[in-house]
């Protein structure tokens, strides 16, 4: 006879089995938290995952990291750009965890009463884990959530439809019918809603909201309810005890506000139902949803959009200290090809670190071009910063693995990578987090300067000189001097800007890219319009065809930039030029780095906007790396396109500052201190002239082919007769005869004799 206890256990197991079968029939999934972590991390898409073995580039643990380690272990209160408003009594959201975007595991508590109240007979379930983990954004801001997944009760007009209700989306200049800055309901009543179809069962954990992006209007939602559904017909409202929970919304239109659900809700759809709004405004909002899609290997839609990477890199956001440690690790792994140095300091005293990658780090090799990447001029545009840190790791790893392409690039190019030009601004954005920083927190330097347009305006000097009639001499088209007022101590110039200028004057860069965020496009100079009364005007440089090719080389190898099916980030559609744009035809900027580089140095500089989301969640970094990896490499390789050579005298000594002119292109370059030069050109045949003071000009034809690798085009210049006479007389301690001065002297003698 069986023991009564055994019979009761068997009956309990049978009931559990029946219950689980019923759950599967409803489409809900109940799994252990660890199982979720393993399945979700495998595709490389989400932030929360079990501990893995140390990665190749994990920063070493030092004693000075003890404080940071402790901070990661202890839950911190949620943060946002401004202090959050407290929820009304009885409606307070349980949020004892750090915001998404921070590099820590989020833990929280929930009460049994809330868990019970959230349960319902409609197939909506509460996650049963004891320790609550954070979930990343579903992707409204990054456009992973398509327009077809967003629906609303009503819309004021098309440009304010549900497809515009994305966190941080920006309105057009005119806020027109097609591109406006939020979803706005057609009526102001309690029956309005906006919903997201996750297209699969998802564990929803939180909602982030903003008001409408507008220069003229003040529209935002001050409170709302959250509802979930499995079929979009039967909805369950998130409860607070026995009643519907009212979440506190925004108190202004730009600062994002996070509300975590008291318990995780498993469903396919989530709906936001505004309950109150700004008195003088309308129901308008932008939002992001936090949620973990549940494992579903049979879901074709999920598999098709899955992005993985095989590169073993450190995919995380790095603060200033972690960035330095990562640079040190790369340098220790590849000491023969890397060198860490700094180009100056920020306003707050943080050093502006750069890493050089070359087979002979620390020295300029004659005939080897210099290339640079810069990121973080806007401190809150952090994707470029992380991409460059990933690029450092990748180049080191692949060089050690003897990847032929990378070895050739490192041995034939001197590469400089400056990941964070505005570290002060980044630290502010980092404190806000990836979703709660908003569109502008950390954009400027500590003293409020936008580095992107803080360089001297040389365009105006050039164009005024060209337009001036009866010019006494030919207007220089390159190496235009910086105005004296700009160099004065009282000029409004950031310390970071001065550091970059000194850096570019010291190193003969040939090509450079500055990585920015908030869009997907490559912008090339000029960035400033020539017509003073216009804000947008196509303003090409004399090297427009070269710049177009350079921009296209990056855009065409990016996974998304030239995809005609992709949704525009905000308002501009750059597909008509294959993901590229002339900066001035987009929006005019005076004093940009691109224009300054072109007019003051030999460097051809472009702005590369690497993503719609300025500060993507950490879980998005592997995919963003895959989107940009090939483009980053291809663009560096373009430094070897065109002609190169050395300008020497008859004794074989290099001539510095010799001018290299190309017939038909009204822009010259100059040789470096050793007489070597590089001139970026598209394939074709060119008439090239080299001239230097005191030397006879030399001209020759140079052919540029389609194969990668610059054509060698050397020049040997002989001194002019006057230069040789001066050299001989100086050798014997005599000064050359000045004929005009001698004539004046003779005239004076004659006058005295007559008198």
Image (spheres, grey):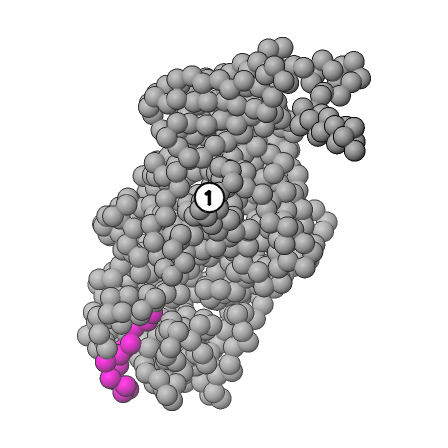
Q: How many marks?
A: 1
Seen in the picture, residue 16 relative to 458 is either above or below; the reply is below
Residue 675 spot, x, y in % from top left: 58, 22
Residue 470 spot, x, y in % from top left: 46, 43
Residue drawn 52% across the image and 70% down it: 80
Residue 359 spot, x, y in % from top left: 58, 24
**Foreground residue among 613 and 752:** 752
Magenta span dominant secondary structure: loop
Residue drawn 31% across the image and 61% down it: 571
Q: Is residue 558 visible?
A: no
Quarter holding the N terminus is bottom left
Q: Please tell me whether mark 1 sits on a helix, a strand or a loop.
A: loop
Q: Which residue sits furthest front? A: 754
Quadrant hosting residue 59: top right
Residue 492 spot, x, y in % from top left: 62, 59
**Foreground residue among 94 and 136:** 136
Residue drawn 49% across the image and 88% down it: 89
What residue is disc 1 on? 470
Quadrant hosting residue 641: top left
Q: Which residue sits furthest top? A: 651
Residue drawn 72% across the image and 20% down it: 736
The span shown in magenta is 180-193
Quadrant hosting residue 12: bottom left
Q: Residues within 10 Å of mark 1 (few under 14, many from 20)?
A: few
Quarter holding the C terminus is top right
Seen in the picture, residue 335 relative to 278 is either above or below; the reply is above
**Foreground residue among 711 and 238:** 711
Q: Is residue 570 visible?
A: yes
Q: Is residue 185 magenta?
A: yes
């Amino acid at each position: 006879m069986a023991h009564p206890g055994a019979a009761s256990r068997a009956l309990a197991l049978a009931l559990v089995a029946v219950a689980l079968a019923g759950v599967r029939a409803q489409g809900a999934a109940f799994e252990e938290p660890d199982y979720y972590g393993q399945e979700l991390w495998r595709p490389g898409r989400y932030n929360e995952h079990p501990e893995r073995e140390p990665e190749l580039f994990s920063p070493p643990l030092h004693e000075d990291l003890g404080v940071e380690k402790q901070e990661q272990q202890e839950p911190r209160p949620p943060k946002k750009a401004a202090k959050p408003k407290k929820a009304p009594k009885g409606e307070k959201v349980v949020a004892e965890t750090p915001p998404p975007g921070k590099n820590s595991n989020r833990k929280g508590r929930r009460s049994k009463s809330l868990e019970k109240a959230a349960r319902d007979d409609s197939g909506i379930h509460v996650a049963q884990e004891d320790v609550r983990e954070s979930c990343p954004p579903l992707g409204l801001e990054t456009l992973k959530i398509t327009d077809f997944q967003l629906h609303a009760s009503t819309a004021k007009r098309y440009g304010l439809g549900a497809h515009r209700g994305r966190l941080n989306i920006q309105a057009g200049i005119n806020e027109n019918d097609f591109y406006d800055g939020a979803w706005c309901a057609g009526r102001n009543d309690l029956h309005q809603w906006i919903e997201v179809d996750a297209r699969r069962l998802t564990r929803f954990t939180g909602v982030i909201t903003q008001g409408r992006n507008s220069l003229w209007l003040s529209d935002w939602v001050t409170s709302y309810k959250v509802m979930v559904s499995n079929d979009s017909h039967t909805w369950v409202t998130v409860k607070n005890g026995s009643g519907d929970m009212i979440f506190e919304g925004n108190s202004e239109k730009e600062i994002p506000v996070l509300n975590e659900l008291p318990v995780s809700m498993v469903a396919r759809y989530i709906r936001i139902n505004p309950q109150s709004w700004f008195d003088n405004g309308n129901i308008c909002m932008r939002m992001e949803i936090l949620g973990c899609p549940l494992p579903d290997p049979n879901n074709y839609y999920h598999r098709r959009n899955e992005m993985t990477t095989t590169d073993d890199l450190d995919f995380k956001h790095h603060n200033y200290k972690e960035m330095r440690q990562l640079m040190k690790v790369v340098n220790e792994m590849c000491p023969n090809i890397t060198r860490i140095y700094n180009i100056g300091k920020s306003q707050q005293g943080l050093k502006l670190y750069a890493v050089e990658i070359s087979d002979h780090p620390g020295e300029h090799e004659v005939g080897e071009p210099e290339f640079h990447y810069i990121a973080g001029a806007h401190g809150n545009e952090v994707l470029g910063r992380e991409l460059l840190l990933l690029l450092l790791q990748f180049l080191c790893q692949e060089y050690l693995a003897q990847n032929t392409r990378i070895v050739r690039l490192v041995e034939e190019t001197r590469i400089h990578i400056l990941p964070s030009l505005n570290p002060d601004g980044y630290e502010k954005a980092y404190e806000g987090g990836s979703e709660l920083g908003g569109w502008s927190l950390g954009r400027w330097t500590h003293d409020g300067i936008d580095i992107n347009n803080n360089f001297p305006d040389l365009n105006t000097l050039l164009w005024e000189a060209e337009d001036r009639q009866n010019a006494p001499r030919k207007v220089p088209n390159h190496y235009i001097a910086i105005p004296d007022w700009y160099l004065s101590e009282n000029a409004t110039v950031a310390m970071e800007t001065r550091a970059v200028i000194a850096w570019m004057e010291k190193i003969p860069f040939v090509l450079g890219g500055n990585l920015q965020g908030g869009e997907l496009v490559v912008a090339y100079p000029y960035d400033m319009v020539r017509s003073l009364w216009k804000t947008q005007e196509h303003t090409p440089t004399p090297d427009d065809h070269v710049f177009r090719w350079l921009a296209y080389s990056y855009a065409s190898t990016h996974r998304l930039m030239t995809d005609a099916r992709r949704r525009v980030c905000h308002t501009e559609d750059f597909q008509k030029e294959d993901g590229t744009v002339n900066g001035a035809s987009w929006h005019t900027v005076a004093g940009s780095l691109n224009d300054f580089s072109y007019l003051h140095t030999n460097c051809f500089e472009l702005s590369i906007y690497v993503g719609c989301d300025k500060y993507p969640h950490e879980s998005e970094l592997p995919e963003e790396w895959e989107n940009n990896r090939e483009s980053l490499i291809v663009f560096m390789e373009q430094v070897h396109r065109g002609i190169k050579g050395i300008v020497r005298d008859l004794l074989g000594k290099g001539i510095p500052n010799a001018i290299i002119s190309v017939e038909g292109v009204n822009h010259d370059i100059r040789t470096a201190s050793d007489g070597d030069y590089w001139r970026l050109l598209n394939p074709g045949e060119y008439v090239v002239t080299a001239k230097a003071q005191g030397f006879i000009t030399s001209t020759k034809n140079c052919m540029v082919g389609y194969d990668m690798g610059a054509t060698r085009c050397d020049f040997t210049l002989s001194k002019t007769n006057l230069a040789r006479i001066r050299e001989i007389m100086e050798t014997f301690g005599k000064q050359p005869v000045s004929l005009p001065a001698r004539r004046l002297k003779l005239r004076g003698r004659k006058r005295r004799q007559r008198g």
